[in-house]
């Protein structure tokens, strides 16, 4: 199946939701005319060689790589695997998906 950017974004939004972080990359206000990033937010970046899953680690927008560079379908599978692991752990620990 061909993975579109929209499908990838929906999957990453779901990952952000179950990790209890904001789906929006930035807070809805600025400080000193600068956007404030939401720490813990996952997003994909488009590089010259493909796509990569990243996570924001500070309010200035600094990020860490979660995945290697790959195609949209490879990044989609990485996100899908992360979600499945989180859900399996949650069901094992709590008997339900913890919100």
Image (cartoon, helix red, strand yellow):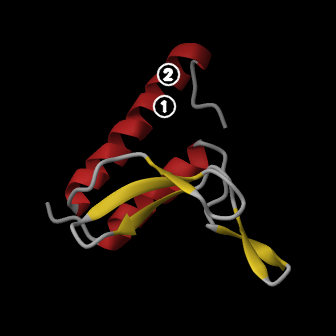
**Of 50 and 23, which appears nearest the observer?**
50
The answer to which quarter of the image holds residue 33 is bottom right
Q: Residue furthest right?
A: 32
The residue that label 2 is drawn on is: 89
The answer to which quarter of the image holds residue 36 is bottom right
Where does the image place residue 5, in percent across and percent down from the top left? 32, 71
The structure residue drawn at horizontal position 58% and vertical position 25%, both measured from the top left corner, is 96
Image height of 33 relative to 71, above or below:
below
Instruction: Tell whether 84 sits left or right of 92.
Output: left
Q: Residue furthest bottom?
A: 33
The secondary structure type at the circle numbered 1 is: helix
The structure residue drawn at horizontal position 16% and vertical position 65%, both measured from the top left corner, is 2
The residue that label 1 is drawn on is: 86
**Of 14 and 68, which appears nearest the observer?**
68
As measured in the structure, the alpha-carbon distance from the residue carrying label 2 to the one carrying label 1 is 5 Å
The secondary structure type at the circle numbered 2 is: helix
Instruction: Tell whether 83 sits left or right of 47.
Output: right
């Amino acid at each position: 199946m061909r993975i579109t950017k929209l499908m990838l974004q929906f999957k990453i939004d779901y990952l952000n939701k179950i990790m209890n972080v904001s789906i929006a990359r930035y807070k809805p206000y600025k400080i000193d005319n600068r956007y404030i990033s939401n720490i813990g937010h996952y997003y994909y970046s488009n590089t010259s060689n493909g796509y990569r899953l990243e996570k924001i680690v500070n309010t200035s927008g600094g990020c860490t790589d979660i995945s290697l560079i790959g195609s949209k379908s490879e990044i989609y599978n990485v996100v899908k695997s992360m979600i499945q692991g989180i859900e399996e752990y949650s069901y094992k620990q709590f008997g339900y998906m913890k919100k």
